[in-house]
Image: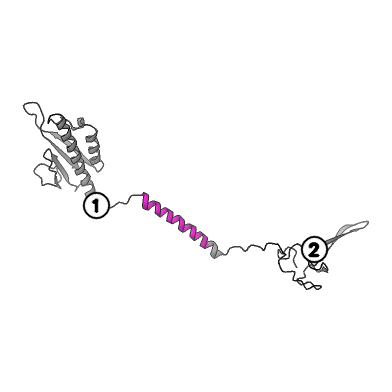
C-alpha cells in the first residue's frame, strides 16, 4: 500500500539504527495498524489479522473530489445570468425609454412654452394696470424659463408688443415660435389666448387656423 495514499492513514513505522565503522543508516519497518505485526509496504490486506488497510484511517478526511467541468460551467452560467439580470434591471429603471413621435413632442413643448409666456405676461399686465412691457424679458424668471423650454426643442420665440395708445400704454402683444427643423409646425399666440399654427415654412400669423 502506498504510504502517500490518504486512505491508509499514518503508517506504523519503526526505525532501527545500525551503527558500523563505515555506515550510519536506518532500516524502516512497516507494521499493521490493527495487529502491529510486520507487513510489506504494498500490502492491502494484513496477512496476520485480515484488516483492510485500504480503508480510510479513522478520523482522517477523505480527499475532496475536484468539481467536474459541467459543474464549473454551471456555476459560471449562474454568475453570468445574475450579472445580466442586474444590468437589465439598471437599464429598465434608470435609463428613460424614448417613446412617441419626436416631432409631436417638440411641437407640444413649443406650444406649452408660448402658453407659459402668455400667462406670465397676463400676470405682469394685471399688476401694471393692463400695460404690457416693451420687452418680454423684463417680466422675469417665468418668461426666461418658458423660452428655454422652446429652445430645448429647437424653437425660437419672438415677442412683438402692440401699438402704444394715447396714454403711452401697450395693450396688446403677439408671440411667435419658429421651428428650427423643416416640417415642424410654427406657432402664433396673442393676448386673445388662441394658439394658431401652420406647417408652411414661414412664421405663423393670426390668420392661421387654431392648433
Query: x%, y% of residue 143?
Result: 22, 35
Query: On residue 12, which mark appears?
Result: 2
Q: Mark 1 or 2, which is nearer the eye?
A: 2
Say which element carries label 1.
loop
Q: With respect to residue 185, does 49 lie above or below? A: below
Residue 84 colored in magenta in the image? yes
- Residue at 52 percent across and 60 percent down: it is 75
Q: With respect to residue 123, does 183 lie above or below? A: below
- Residue at 14 percent across and 41 percent down: it is 188
Residue 210 appears left or right of 77: left
- Residue 181 visible in the shown view: no
Q: Residue furthest top?
A: 167
**First to last magenta residue range:** 73-96
Residue behind mark 1: 101
Q: Nearer the viewer, residue 89 or 153?
A: 89
Say which element carries label 2.
strand
Amino acid at each position: 500500500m502506498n504510504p502517500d495514499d490518504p486512505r491508509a492513514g499514518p503508517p506504523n513505522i519503526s526505525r532501527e539504527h545500525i551503527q558500523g565503522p563505515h555506515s550510519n543508516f536506518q532500516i524502516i519497518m512497516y507494521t499493521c495498524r490493527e495487529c502491529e505485526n510486520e507487513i510489506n509496504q504494498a500490502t492491502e490486506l494484513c496477512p496476520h489479522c485480515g484488516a483492510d488497510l485500504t480503508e480510510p484511517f479513522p478520523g482522517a478526511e477523505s480527499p475532496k473530489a475536484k468539481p467536474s467541468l459541467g459543474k464549473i460551467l454551471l456555476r459560471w452560467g449562474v454568475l453570468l445570468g445574475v450579472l445580466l439580470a442586474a444590468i437589465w434591471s439598471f437599464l429598465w429603471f434608470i435609463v428613460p425609454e424614448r417613446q412617441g413621435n419626436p416631432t409631436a413632442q417638440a411641437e407640444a413643448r413649443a406650444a406649452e412654452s408660448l402658453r407659459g409666456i402668455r400667462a406670465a405676461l397676463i400676470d405682469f399686465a394685471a399688476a401694471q394696470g393692463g400695460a404690457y412691457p416693451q420687452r418680454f424679458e423684463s417680466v422675469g424668471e417665468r418668461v426666461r424659463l418658458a423660452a428655454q423650454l422652446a429652445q430645448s426643442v429647437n424653437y425660437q420665440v419672438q415677442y412683438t408688443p402692440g401699438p402704444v395708445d394715447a396714454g403711452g400704454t401697450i395693450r396688446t402683444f403677439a408671440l411667435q415660435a419658429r421651428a428650427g427643423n423643416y416640417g415642424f409646425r410654427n406657432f402664433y399666440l396673442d393676448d386673445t389666448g388662441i394658439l394658431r399654427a401652420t406647417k408652411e415654412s414661414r412664421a405663423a400669423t393670426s390668420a392661421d387656423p387654431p392648433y
